[in-house]
Image (cartoon, grey):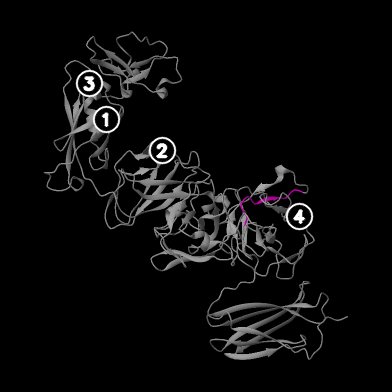
């Protein structure tokens, strides 16, 4: 701002400017109307043929008719007054204000003098003491606001006043984030800016004006009615911090710093990779704890229940356990306040958030080393409302003592995924003690140079696998195994994921903290074939031995993050059981179904050849019964190692089930 002062130091004139107004520089900035002060609405750039010393300017140079009356009318539009809390108010004038008038302006709120501070040349910030004699709290009654005098720089300009009313609504209440668009498409006419949506689930209106959105403030008063949603875009804010396309979080807080909510987002919150960067935002229901889905298309997955994806153990310099890190399958900022239950822990645990990790919390309590050090351990649960709970067991590895070498093997892989981004590698702790896989690296190069190793698990984040536990890694945890019915919760987004070759390839894994040598190495090639029910596209493989090429198609197409062999119990999951005689050359089933009239199908498949050698359909089955394969003690004409997959499916009303047994049979010599 260029100021003009007289000999007494009184401000007589002023000309503010911004870099954007200069058009790259090289041309003078002139007043369109020389009788008024130099605000942005009264300025233009000099062009060729127009002398800056001419008293009369052509009509084309004049800006839109700036006047005191226009500013006054614009400033009193609804929404220009933004309450920031008790005794605080921002007034957006709508146009660049006369800088000389701004120096001389005074303010009152309901007759109470207010301190006036200009945060910009068009925004006035007012603060005042609350009125004790008011008939009700100032937050709930209409109060006139005065700001003045308003005048121009021309001789004889009359002073005017801004007068208006505002109603202050409560700013505390239950608000849920229900939409997010961190990566809009440039030039999209429908939604070209970063934005997010809030839903008021309270039973009263809420004023979002006092809220700080990661340091940003709304430019207009925004009243959110009960059970209503509002989309807020970047141009509606002052000092908008931006929403990173790579994921992040944004806290919502009141003027005194009380955090009232948080928004967290990540590219992996989309249902599939093709939606990332497509201009489609994220959406979730106002129900606390619900998960993100891609806005618009039908969601691929329904909300999974709240669950622990895993845990980690932080250690001090002396090897003592200093914290238990718990990984949840939800953004912490989208969850209500959780209730914690720790088995055998005396006293309360201290809960903290880890910066930059939106799905991790850390617990600390006195005596936690004795509770968690192997082979001790404890069980803990977290939830809310008494109905939705997630539980896990935690045991931490002991550091600083002699421990056996780590045993970490590839247990399952999907290298030819049907859906983009759904490939994964599942690892299992094959040792007898807990294993911390922080710093885990993988390489798919034939000869691994140091640059070929890609980090899957950050070295500064602890992730512990108990003996027999698994962890599945892929480009995004949500995309792994799209459409597979047996997914588990232990799915992890690899920090640096390199796509697996669909036809043939190899993979090595290592833990640099223990050794630079590979802990396991696997290979795959086009010669791997499966039985009749197997599909080359979208089917995972499980390890059957110690060799690099010991693979077999998984029985359930794939189960990333879930131990093989676990079954999901339901009302009739145990309806059918197997019967095998002592010689192992005959086989049968017996059943207990909830109602008669059902159907049972038995398929016998040569394994691993895949040839169907027998099929029986039992119709109108009774509630109880048995059936024996009519072999009469004769061997089956099997061409392979003498094993048969016995695949049994049954239907009885609403009861449905399926079981598969692998039975040894004598083969023809």
Asked where in the image residue 5 lies, by quadrant, the reply is top left
Confirm whether the magenta stretch covers residue 19: no
Q: Name the residue under label 2.
A: 240
Instruction: Indicate the position of residue 410 as horizontal and vertical percent values.
Output: 69, 60
Q: Mark 3 points at which residue?
A: 152
Q: Name the residue under label 1.
A: 117
Disc with the residue nearer the chain's start (1 vs 2) = 1
User: Do residues under tags 3 and 2 come within 8 Å of each other at their CB atoms?
Assistant: no
| Label 3 neighbour load within 10 Å: few <14, some 14-19, many 20+ | many
- Which quarter of the rendering shows the C terminus? bottom right
Disc with the residue nearer the chain's start (4 vs 3) = 3
- Which quarter of the rendering shows the N terminus? top left
Distance (Cα) linking label 4 and label 3: 78 Å
Confirm whether the magenta stretch covers residue 437: yes
**Dominant secondary-structure state across the stretch colored magenta:** loop
| Label 1 neighbour load within 10 Å: few <14, some 14-19, many 20+ | some
Instruction: Indicate the position of residue 488 as horizontal and vertical percent values.
Output: 57, 64
Q: Mark 4 points at which residue?
A: 504
Left or right: 427, with 641 as reference point: left
- The residue positioned 78% from the left and 81% from the top of the image is 665
- Toward the right, the furthest residue is 669
């Amino acid at each position: 701002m260029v100021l003009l002062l007289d000999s007494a130091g009184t401000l007589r004139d002023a000309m503010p400017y911004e870099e954007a107004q200069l058009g790259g520089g090289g041309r003078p900035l002139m007043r369109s109307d020389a009788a008024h002060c130099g605000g942005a609405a009264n300025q233009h750039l000099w062009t060729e043929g127009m002398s800056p010393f001419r008293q009369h300017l052509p009509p084309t140079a004049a800006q839109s008719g700036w006047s005191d009356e226009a500013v006054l009318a614009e400033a009193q539009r609804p929404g220009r007054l933004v309450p920031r809390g008790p005794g605080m108010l921002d007034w957006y004038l709508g146009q660049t204000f006369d800088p000389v008038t701004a120096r001389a302006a005074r303010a009152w709120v309901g007759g109470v003098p207010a301190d006036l501070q200009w945060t910009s040349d068009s925004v006035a910030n007012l603060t005042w003491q609350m009125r004790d004699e008011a008939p009700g709290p100032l937050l709930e009654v209409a109060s006139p606001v005065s700001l003045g005098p308003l005048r121009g720089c021309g001789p004889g300009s009359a002073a005017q006043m801004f007068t208006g009313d505002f109603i202050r609504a409560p700013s505390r209440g239950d608000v849920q984030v229900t939409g997010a668009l961190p990566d809009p498409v440039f030039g999209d006419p429908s939604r070209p800016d970063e934005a997010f949506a809030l839903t008021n689930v309270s039973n009263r209106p809420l004023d979002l004006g006092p809220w700080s959105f990661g340091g940003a403030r709304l430019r207009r008063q925004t009243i959110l009615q009960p059970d209503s949603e509002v989309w807020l875009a970047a141009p509606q804010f002052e000092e908008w911090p931006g929403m990173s396309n790579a994921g992040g979080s944004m806290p919502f807080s009141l003027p005194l710093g009380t955090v009232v909510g948080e928004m967290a987002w990540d590219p992996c919150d989309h249902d599939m990779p093709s939606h990332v960067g497509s201009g489609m935002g994220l959406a979730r229901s106002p129900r606390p704890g619900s998960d993100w889905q891609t806005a618009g298309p039908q969601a691929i997955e329904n909300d999974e229940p709240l669950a622990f994806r895993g845990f980690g153990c932080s250690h001090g310099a002396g090897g003592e356990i200093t914290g238990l890190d718990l990984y949840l399958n939800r953004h912490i900022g989208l969850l209500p306040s959780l209730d914690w239950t720790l088995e055998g822990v005396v006293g309360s645990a201290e809960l903290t958030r880890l910066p930059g990790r939106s799905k991790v919390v850390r617990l600390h309590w006195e005596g936690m080393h004795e509770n968690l050090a192997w082979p001790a351990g404890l069980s803990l649960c977290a939830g809310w409302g008494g109905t939705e709970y997630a539980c896990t067991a935690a045991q931490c590895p002991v550091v600083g003592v002699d421990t056996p070498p780590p045993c970490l093997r590839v247990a399952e892989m999907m290298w030819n995924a049907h859906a983009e981004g759904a490939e994964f590698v599942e690892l299992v702790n094959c040792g007898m003690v807990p294993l911390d896989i922080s710093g885990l690296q993988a390489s798919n190069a034939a000869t691994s140079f140091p640059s070929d190793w890609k980090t899957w698990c950050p070295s500064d984040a602890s992730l512990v696998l108990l003996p027999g536990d698994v962890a599945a890694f892929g480009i995004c945890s949500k995309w792994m195994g799209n459409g597979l019915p047996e997914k588990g919760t232990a799915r992890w987004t690899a920090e640096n994921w390199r796509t697996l070759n669909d036809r043939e390839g190899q993979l090595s894994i290592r833990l640099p903290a223990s050794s630079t040598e590979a802990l396991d190495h696997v290979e795959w090639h086009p010669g791997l074939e499966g039985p009749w029910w197997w599909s080359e596209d979208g089917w995972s493989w499980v390890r059957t031995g110690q060799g690099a090429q010991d693979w077999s198609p998984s029985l359930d197409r794939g189960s990333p993050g879930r131990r093989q062999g676990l079954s999901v119990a339901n009302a009739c999951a145990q309806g059918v059981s197997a019967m095998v005689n002592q010689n192992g050359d005959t086989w049968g089933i017996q059943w207990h179904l909830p109602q008669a009239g059902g159907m049972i199908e038995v398929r016998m498949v040569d394994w691993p050849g895949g040839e169907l050698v027998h099929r029986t359909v039992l119709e109108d089955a009774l509630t109880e019964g048995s059936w024996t394969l009519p072999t009469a003690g004769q061997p089956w004409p099997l061409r392979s190692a003498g094993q048969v997959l016995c695949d049994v499916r049954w239907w009885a009303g609403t009861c449905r089930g399926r079981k598969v047994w692998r039975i040894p049979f004598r083969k023809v010599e």
